[in-house]
Image (cartoon, rainbow, N blue to C red):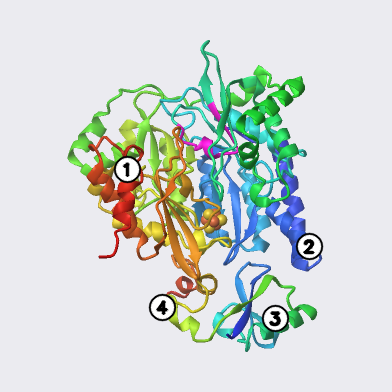
Amino acid sequence: MTAIVSANLLATGRVAYLGREGAWVEDIAEATVYSDAAAAEAELAAAQQRGGALGVVEPFVTGYTRADHRTLPEGRPTMALRDAIRAFGPTVGYGRRAEQGD
Amino acid sequence: MYRYDEFDAGFVAERVAQFTDQVERRLAGTLSEDQFKPLRLMNGVYLQLHAYMLRVAIPYGTLSSRQMRCFAHIARTYDKGYGHFTTRQNLQFNWPALKDVPAILRELAAVEMHCIQTSGNCIRNTTADQFAGAAADEIEDPRPYAEIIRQWSSLHPEFSFLPRKFKIALTGAPSDRAAIQVHDIGYQVVKDAMGEVGFAVYVGGGQGRTPLIAHRIREFLPKADLLSYTNSILRVYNLEGRRDNKFKARIKILVHEKGADAIREAVEADFAANHDAGLTLPQGEIDRITAYFTLPDLAARPQVSAAVEARRTSDPAFARFLARNVFPHKVPGHGVLTVSLKPTDGIPGDATAEQMDHLADLAQRYSADELRVSHEQNIVLPHVRLDDLPAIYDSLRANDLAADNVGLVSDIICCPGLDYCALATARSIPIAQAISKRFAEPERTAEIGDLRVKISGCINACGHHHVGHIGILGLDKAGQETYQLTLGGSADERCSIGDITGRGFSAERIVDAVETVVDTYLSHRTGAEESFIDAYRRLGMKPFKEALYVPAA
Ligand code: SF4
């Protein structure tokens, strides 16, 4: 299964993903999707090595396929519910979707 | 109300300055997360799924209008415009940025509040009956003693690194509204044969993965010995409590493994040996603290209010509100009013900044400037005149705060669950919302009567599911949210731990299961006067199980 690297931003605590050129992005759609968990782990290790994880806390790798987020929140995600809730916010309002007004 | 003395103000200011510096160093990268995490936790800052969470202590659940307005201001300025009142009489902000936390702590300190000891293996916020100092059935207000414990336990060097966290609860009335029997220590105000007032002492209760009911280890403790005895309990725990296994480190496990008699002996021996003058409370000091909690000057009024009676007969919704949300006050012509934070489809315990401001206004105008937070996640206006109830009710209605369901099936205790909490195994809020919608019909809920539903999103049991008449525990079974149902728990003076019905239910099925339980109760009860919990105690699990697990035809 393909995978992504996620974490929370140090300054705000908001959910973030490792995106293009080692930048941390808040929208899962902009996350870089790696071929598998091992590749994602390697990318995270490299980011940590070059100081690219100093602005985040508790980074981790989790399974994710690009098709997942289109099924949310109505459809049953193939990603873990926990990851889906992190990506899209609480299912009871106040999340990213609520902020974006949809 | 109690006001900070110079000592409190000093240590809070010092701590805020310290933490401000620590946050700056963390943001600048000179402190690592490993170094910083224990420091932020000591100041009530957790990292949850979406953001940091800041937990503010509301000592014994008492707060002033000014403090409530400060919460509203923080919610608006630094958060998403709301806050969450918890079962621990705390308030949680769900979205503060770490960089803003020092400013938030300064705002809180300005109204004499802080987040110290809302995390970590220390003595946590001391909780109390939300009706303390107001309820007609009370022997004596327990809050002065909660305050004495708070002062003594704040930054206590010997008890800052206990084997695990430690929770103390007090009640001043024979009806236990503070769930003292599921706390590490519970103190209940009692009168002895001579009419002297003191405490019955309960030790070793708790919920979480091993729910246990506290043992009454002493029938009567003189008030003067409150700290001395608490100290002895903590010393025995600190020495003998297990530190090898996090899940066995609470005092309840020690009491359970050694037996209540052995613990009583050890505590009494320590108490006898160390019963030194240092911790014996001088009457003058008790009086000084008690003076902060004197009942506001409420003149006795007619026991029956003509305004209330007129409205009651003409307005059934108001009549229901009176029946459920108003409790008898010590002073005739007054009432203790519970404002339910459980509207249909609402998030239990959540209040918007506007609602907080509104509640502060009502408290200022009608309740001697005082509010309370209950462990049931509702807000209390403790000192209202009966004559004012119609006006208060109308005002609450206009702000979506007039739910007339206190103690009913829709007055659900619910933890944040997987929608927010990093430890959760399943969501809890959507289940509470679905149940509240299923039981939205006020006549029907009133007909069902007293029924406490409590939901936790994991085994840590912040939602008190073990002591719900109906308890729901959200679990993760192979990636699917699954809900385990328990029946027959109770958090009051007849405390009991619920029994598991059998295999769990899916998110889709759990609300039907709750309804099946309710219908089974209704069809088996001897009459409306037999409450759910009484019926369950008479009937046992059998009829409920039969109704829940009908074999496939
Ligand atoms: S019971 Fe579990 S899910 Fe609920 S708030 Fe406590 S730790 Fe979080």
* Position of residue A81 measured from the top left corner of the image (x, y, whole percent): 50, 71
Instruction: Check residue B25 in the rendering and tell me which mark sits there, or answer none.
Output: 2
- Mark identifier at residue A75: 4
**CA–CA distance between discs 1 and 4?**
41 Å
Residue labelled with disc 1: B393
Labels 1, 4: front one? 4
Q: CA distance from mark 3 to mark 2?
A: 28 Å
> Which region of the structure is painted magenta?
B176-188
B40 vs A77, nearest the viewer: A77
Judged by depth in the image, the label closer to the viewer, 4 or 2, is 4
Q: Are marks 3 and 1 in contact (CB under 8 Å)?
A: no
Q: Quadrant of ligand 1?
A: bottom right
Q: Which residue is mark 3?
A: A41
Please identify the quarter of the rendering in which residue B508 is found.
bottom left
Relative vertical location of residue A34 with respect to residue B132 in this rendering, above or below:
below
Q: Earlier in the sequence, mark 1 or mark 2?
A: 2
Amino acid type at mark 2 = Arg
Mark 4 lies on a secondary structure that is loop
